[in-house]
Amino acid sequence: MKIIEWHEKFSVGIKEIDDQHKDLIEILDALYYAMLKAKGSELVETTLEKVLQYTKTHFATEELLFKKYSYPEEKAHKAEHDAMLKKVMAFQRDFTNGELIGVDLMQFLNSWFVEHLQTTDYRYVEFFKKKGISTLP
């Protein structure tokens, strides 16, 4: 059972970003599985770190595109990215301090991923389509 299934409705029309979104779904599923099956705090901690690092890489990719093509909502979009990273780092800190974060973390990541993708990310889809961008430069 996966926490998030990839659907074409998630596509932003830029192959590399879609591929990163798919990879992130796989990492989120690995985290969900590790927590669900109580695979041990070390695996959960490692996988949570992987979520954080991959998310930073993905956000950097999007933000580079925004800057390169002068995306008008760049600052607002980046602010959402920063807020998400701050929240995940808080979950990571809480986990390290022995707090139970499983349900809250997975609910946050699941809802954030889907909502951010279908609202904030979709706002740049039309912008990049008009510029003829379907692949990273």
Image (cartoon, rainbow, N blue to C red):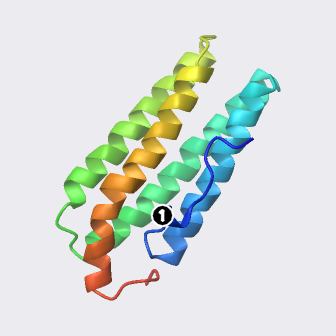
* Residue located 63% across and 35% down the image: 48
Nearer to us in this view, 42 or 8: 8
Q: Where is residue 124 in the image (x, y as percent from the top left)?
A: 29, 67
Dividing the picture into quadrants, the one containing residue 98 is top right
**Is 108 located above or below residue 82 in the figure?**
above
User: Left or right of 51: which side holds 61?
Assistant: left
* Residue located 25% across and 75% down the image: 127
The residue sitting at the left extreme is 72
Q: Where is residue 82 in the image (x, y as percent from the top left)?
A: 34, 43
The image quadrant where one finds the C terminus is bottom left
* Residue located 45% across and 80% down the image: 136
Total numbered badges shown on the rendered structure: 1
Sort mark 1 into few (<14), some (14-19) or many (20+) by Cα contacts within 10 Å: few
Dividing the picture into quadrants, the one containing residue 101 is top right
Q: Can residue 68 be seen in this view?
A: no
- Assign a secondary structure to mark 1: helix
The image quadrant where one finds the N terminus is top right
User: Left or right of 66: which side holds 3?
Assistant: right
The residue sitting at the bottom extreme is 132
Nearer to us in this view, 71 or 113: 113
User: Left or right of 129: which side holds 95?
Assistant: right
Q: Can residue 63 be seen in this view?
A: yes
Q: Position of residue 14 (x, y in %)?
A: 46, 76
**Is 64 located above or below residue 30 in the figure?**
below
Query: For the residue marked with disc 1, what is the amino acid?
Result: Lys
Q: Mark 1 points at which residue?
A: 9
* Residue located 38% across and 55% down the image: 118
Q: Where is residue 86 in the image (x, y as percent from the top left)?
A: 40, 33
